[in-house]
Amino acid sequence: MAIADQPVSISEGKSLFAPLIDAPAVVLAVSGGPDSTALLILAARWRAALRRGPTLVAVTVNHGLRLEAAREAAAVGRLARKLGVTHRTLRWTGNKPSSGLQEAARIARYRLLSDAARARGASHIVTAHTLDDQAETLLIRITRGSGLTGLGAMAKVTKLSSLPRKRGKEMLLFRPFLDIAKARLIATLRQAKIPFADDPSNRDPRFTRSRLRHVMPVLAQEGLDAKRLALLARRMRRADAALEAAVERAAVAIARSHESDAVVFDARAWAEQPEEVRLRLLGRAVAQTGNEGPVELGKLESLLAAIDAITCNCETRTSFRRTLAGAMVTLSGGHLRIERAPSRRKSRGKKAQAR
């Protein structure tokens, strides 16, 4: 049997879940598919071999999109009880969007998982993303024109900072199987004679990820298999971390103000930084001061190009003002200032009064 098809051993499982040893409780995201069912089996085995360890809580999110979902959730519940693991089924209620369904479902899923984790005092949400998922994610990011950060794909441990936190430490998302091929998880289930659900939406050509799964075998024939793509993502994350360190140093070196509501840089010192560092400094400042959500990379690059047309030509006395994502960027008197943009509603009100 090839290594890529071998079941995950007990010793491997011990190593995979070792980072969770001191967690008070963890939530396992288990849909009933092969990957997450293997997660439930391997995590339960690992926990059963410990004298002390975290409480395991398996959570199944029923998105209400398929009739089979309720039956699959019930099957997960039966398996969890057999393994001595607490199980909960949560449902995504309300209207479903006609477009962007998978992304909306993903957001709802993590919100529900986070709610369940907080209710149980869990410090981690554990998902069953595999080596194959990592490769597909990288390809999706490439097709969408992602920058270096996006091409890092998924990290094994991620802070769920985007989700509200009521108390205690920041919750973490943990992906223990990112270096494990999906075939090995299926082999693990077959060895244990554990059935699993088959979600037909994973093959639905309406979804980008499904279409890319059909492309993967062709890429693999050219040497660009899941392992090679995941290696590229890992190298992108390494380069991204080095760049972030450089940005941290640059932010301290060229900052000209410590105002709580604005970021101010020396324009000449700004112009001397490498382009990627300038882009990231600008993105950080807009995200910090703006109030309209994430900034599109393309729009940020356009704004940087407009600023560079002035600062990189040493025309630092020229006046410049633009807004992006709720932030206002002003270049005047040799300083680049990024702060919260005036409220659009108030601005319209002032115009109406002037008339």
Image: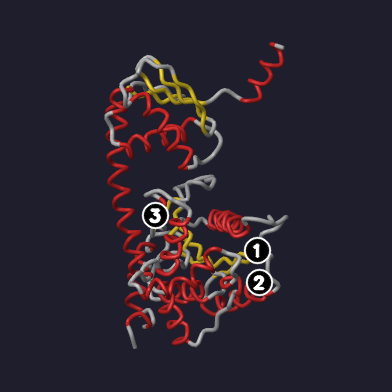
Residue placed under numbered mark 1 in the picture:
63
The quadrant of the rendering that contains the C terminus is top right
Element on which disc 2 rests: helix
Vertical placement of 325 versus 209: above or below? above
Q: Residue at the spot x=55%, y=80% of the render?
A: 196
Q: Residue at x 59, y 67 (%)?
A: 60
Q: Secondary structure at mark 1?
A: loop
Q: Earlier in the sequence, mark 3 or mark 1?
A: 1
Quadrant into which the N terminus falls: bottom left
Asked if the residue under mark 1 is in contact with the one under mark 2, i.e. CB atoms within 8 Å, the reply is yes
Residue that numbered label 2 is attached to:
69
Marks 3/1: CA–CA distance:
28 Å
110 vs 151, left or right, is right
Q: Residue 297 is drawn in which quadrant?
A: top left
Query: Relative to 196, does residue 279 appear above or below in the rendering?
Result: above
Q: Where 275 falls versus 74 (above or below)?
A: above
Task: Name the residue type under label 3.
Answer: Leu
Identify residue for label 3.
151
Image position, residue 130 (x, y; %): 43, 69
N-terminal of the pair, mark 2 or mark 1, is 1
Question: In the shown orientation, is residue 31 left or right of residue 148?
Answer: right
User: Residues under labels 2 and 1: Cα distance?
Assistant: 8 Å
The kind of residue on which mark 2 rests is Ala
